[in-house]
């Protein structure tokens, strides 16, 4: 059976194609009789308007691309997709999801050129694709990078990020307020702005307190976040039994830290206090609930989406470089320093 087109609807309703189009687009000055006839024909023929074609004819595309470079199964990526879907629904937009793999960069550009999307939101890893970023900028296509790895000087991208350094300082300062002085740090060895800023925040907060950071107190691993956390906690806590607290670069890594502490016969927070970063969904439901630095992902996506819509309405809208604050979320994984029981 051939696809029903607008001409079929117009003929069934006994009106011109222009009139049928005006009814479907909600335009005024169409009689009630003709409107009823058109909608009746739509129901009878089970006509589904080609939304993309209609929007293109009006010079408007109502779909946004989300380009994800982090593993799609990670809690961060899942939350990013969820919040972007919510923002798109609020504004009446559709979401087109791309996972960055071989050949997908071209698909993103083709989606723009083919009128399927009007803007793009890219995560850290997706924006590390130089060809993709260069193509988006050369074609002057609206795109926003969340938590950029770096900012290309010639890029026309917009950026939305958080205060990674300040957030890390908040985490360490909280542990210091609880009386901890031997504080370890565990991170992924990826060379990202956020990783570097959080590492620097740890070192700066320790230095501000007049404390020396020992090499054995730091672990920078590679691989899956849980494994990095597990290996890091085991390495630090077996080398120096005086370490009473750990600041961890991300909550995903902190999940592995909690497992390692348990495997060593220690308890959180009685023996070791732990602070994470990001406030992913699992942070509040692990045992014990994780004290962490909240990354305002809902607000980040809202800022990105609002800017993309502004760029669509006015192409001369200037790029943005927004920095949003973090905040400490205190739960049950920390306690005041106390000497660990012998044995």
Image (tube, helix red, strand yellow):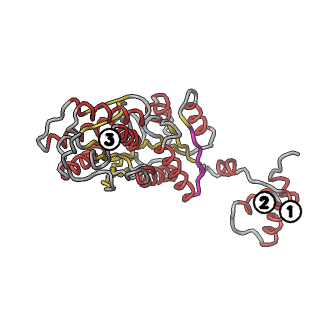
User: CA gap, disc 1 to disc 3?
Assistant: 66 Å
On-image quarter of the C terminus:
top left
Residue linked to disc 1: 13
Q: Are marks 1 and 2 in contact (CB under 8 Å)?
A: yes
**In this orientation, which residue lies closer to the viewer: 171 or 94?**
171
Structural distance between the alpha carbons of marks 1 and 2: 8 Å
Q: Does the magenta stretch include residue 148?
A: no
Could you tell which of marks 2 and 3 lies nearer the N-terminus?
Answer: 2
Drawn side of residue 129 relative to residue 206, left or right? right
Quarter-of-image position of residue 239:
top left
Residue extending farthest to the front is 343
The secondary structure that dominates the magenta segment is: strand
Q: Is residue 14 above or below residue 116?
A: below
Q: Where is residue 145 in the image (x, y as percent from the top left)?
A: 43, 41
- Tag on residue 248? 3
Under circle 2, the secondary element is helix
Give the percent coordinates (x, y) of residue 199. 27, 37
Which residue is more in the foreground, 214 or 259?
259
The quarter of the picture where the N terminus appears is top right
Q: Distance between the residues labelled 2 and 3?
A: 60 Å
Circle nearer the viewer, 2 or 3: 3
Q: Residue at point 39% right, 53% down?
A: 296
Neighbour tally class for label 1: few under 14, some 14-19, many 20 plus, Cα within 10 Å = many
Q: Is 97 covered by the magenta stretch?
A: yes
Of callouts 1 and 3, which one flags the residue occurring earlier in the amino acid sequence?
Answer: 1
Q: Give the range drawn in magenta.
A: 92-98
Classed neighbour count for the residue bearing mark 3: other residues with Cα under 10 Å, few (<14), some (14–19), many (≥20): many
Q: Mark 2 points at which residue?
A: 20
* Residue 42 spot, x, y in % from top left: 81, 60
- Image quadrant of residue 227? top left
Q: What element carries label 3?
A: strand
């Amino acid at each position: 059976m051939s696809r029903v087109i607008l001409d079929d609807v117009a003929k069934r309703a006994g009106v011109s194609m222009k009139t049928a189009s005006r009814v479907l687009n909600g335009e005024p000055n169409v009689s009630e009789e003709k409107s009823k006839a058109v909608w009746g024909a739509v129901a009878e023929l089970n006509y589904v308007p080609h939304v993309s074609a209609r929007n293109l004819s009006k010079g408007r595309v109502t779909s946004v691309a989300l380009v994800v470079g982090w593993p799609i199964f990670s809690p961060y990526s899942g939350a990013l997709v969820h919040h972007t879907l919510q923002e798109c629904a609020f504004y009446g937009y559709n979401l087109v999801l791309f996972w960055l793999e071989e050949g997908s960069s071209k698909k993103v550009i083709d989606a723009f050129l083919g009128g399927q999307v009007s803007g793009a939101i890219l995560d850290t890893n997706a924006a590390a694709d130089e060809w993709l970023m260069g193509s988006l900028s050369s074609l002057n296509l609206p795109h926003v990078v969340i938590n950029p790895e770096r900012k290309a000087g010639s890029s026309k991208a917009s950026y939305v990020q958080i205060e990674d350094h300040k957030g890390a300082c908040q985490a360490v300062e909280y542990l210091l307020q609880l009386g901890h002085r031997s504080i370890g740090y565990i991170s992924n060895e990826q060379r990202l702005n956020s990783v570097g800023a959080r590492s620097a925040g740890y070192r700066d907060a320790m230095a501000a307190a007049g404390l020396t950071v020992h090499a054995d107190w730091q672990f920078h691993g590679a691989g899956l976040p849980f494994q990095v956390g597990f290996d890091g906690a085991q390495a630090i806590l077996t080398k120096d039994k005086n370490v009473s607290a750990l600041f961890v670069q991300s909550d995903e890594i902190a999940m592995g830290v909690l497992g390692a502490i348990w495997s060593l016969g220690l308890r959180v927070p009685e023996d070791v206090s732990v602070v994470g970063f990001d406030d992913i969904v699992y942070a509040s439901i692990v045992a014990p609930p994780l004290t962490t630095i909240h990354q305002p992902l809902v607000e980040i996506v809202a800022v990105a989406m609002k800017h993309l819509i502004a760029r669509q309405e006015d192409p001369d809208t200037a790029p943005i470089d927004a920095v949003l604050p973090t905040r400490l979320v205190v739960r049950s994984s920390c306690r005041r320093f106390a000497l660990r029981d012998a044995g």
